[in-house]
Image: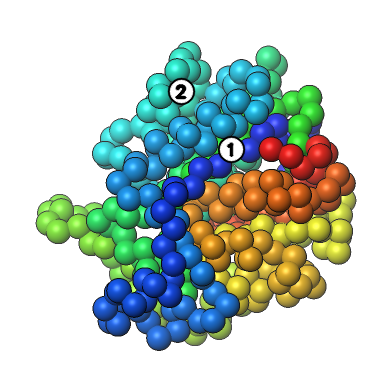
Amino acid sequence: MKTRELYIKAVGTYLPENMTDIKEARKTKPAAEFEEDLFDDGEYVSISVAGDTPAVDMAVHAARDALKVAEEPVQILFHASMVQQGPEGWSSAGYILRELGLSNLGGFDIVQGANSVLGALEIASGWLAVVPDARNALVTTALNAGSAEFDRWHSAGTSIVLGDGAAAIVLGKGGGIARVEAVNSLMFPELEGIHRGTLPLFEKDLGIRRQVDLSVRFKEFALTNGFGPMDLLTQITNMNTEVVQRSLKDAQLEAGDIARVIHQHVGPMMIDLSVMRPLGLPLSKSTWDYGQTVGHVGSCDYLLSLGYLLNTGQLSVGDHVLLTGCAPGFNVASAILTITGDGAQ
């Protein structure tokens, strides 16, 4: 989808002060908690850990920073999350708006796994395009992977470690630090079971809540459906390439025009095989060098990395940035930005 007059006006990020050094963690954790290939040399260096700080409170911190920079009112909030961030039947968006002191605004919770921010971007672009008086939208996202249902070392899959943090952007018309050229997403439901495995769809007795383990679900799905690991990687790569090519076409760009690629912080091998090599781009153009220092912070990865590139002066006016990744569903999404400001936040 080619977007119309859509800009990122401000980026706000929040990372807890506590960082866990991976090598130190390996010394203190029982060996059984670490797979042999979980932390290869050159992979994760550290992860951000928020302790008992709720994800939505971190989202409020990031939102305040973004709103302060934008210095413009917003008319709607989209809170993007990888998982439920409070009691069942409760609204994260309502809580965030109250904490920000904003009322009489639209508010929505967008739950599309680690692609929730890109989903929120796609929905917000449509809202801003069709509502006559719409000027700005706030998008927030956050994750605290320290809850009982997660094991940050294993839950997200082999070679992926979960970190904690939050991020926010103000989207709107009339200019900003980056122009959103295109955003696309596709759902491939034939692979929906990757994130479900053999788990039942309905449980009458809650009992002891299962801890999330996507590696087990992935293996169950592959075994049940006769897929080899490389078969699934090939399919995921092809799907990701398809959605990226759609965005490149909408933006009237070629892969070689992309200055930087922002992917979820899932490990260099996956990023290289599924995204960089198909585009003919070196891994050095990705943001893995940053991602390995904070971990996979769910849907925050895209905005944390964007904020990092802007704050460290690694983007110049005219640079094109590709955001792309995958999520449950099976969802693949991509967006292309053009830097229009001076890269400062």
Residue at image point 27% right, 39% down = 88
214 over 314 or under it: above or below: below
Q: In this rendering, is residue 121 above or below 264? A: above
x and y, in percent, of residue 161 in the image = 44, 66
Image location (x, y in percent) of residue 314: 76, 53
Estimate the x, y position of residue 96 in percent, counting from the top left: 42, 29
Residue 129 is left or right of residue 175, and the answer is left
In the rendered structure, which amino acid carries the disc numbered 2? Leu
Q: Mark on residue 318?
A: none
Q: In the image, what residue type sits under mark 1?
A: Gly
Q: Is residue 2 left or right of residue 256?
A: left
Mark 2: secondary structure: helix
Residue 127 versus residue 322 in the image, above or below: above
Q: Residue at x 60, y 25 (%)?
A: 68
Name the residue located 34 percent from the left edge and 77 percent from the top edge: 27
Task: Give 131 or 323, whichever is nearer the viewer.
Answer: 323
Instruction: Report the residue marked by disc 2.
Output: 100
Looking at the rendered structure, the secondary structure element under dot 1 is strand
Question: The N terminus is located in which quarter?
Answer: top right
Q: Is residue 242 visible?
A: no
3D distance between C-alphas at marks 1 and 2: 14 Å
Res. 210 visible in picture: yes
Residue beneath the point at 64% across and 46% down: 307
Image mark count: 2
Residue 265 horizontal/vertical position (percent): 55, 62
Dot 1 surroundings within 10 Å: few (below 14), some, or many (20 or more)?
A: many
Say which of 114 and 122 sits in front: 114
Residue 12 is marked as 1
Q: Where's the C terminus, which quadrant?
A: top right
Task: Name above or below for residue 90 compared with residue 215.
Answer: above
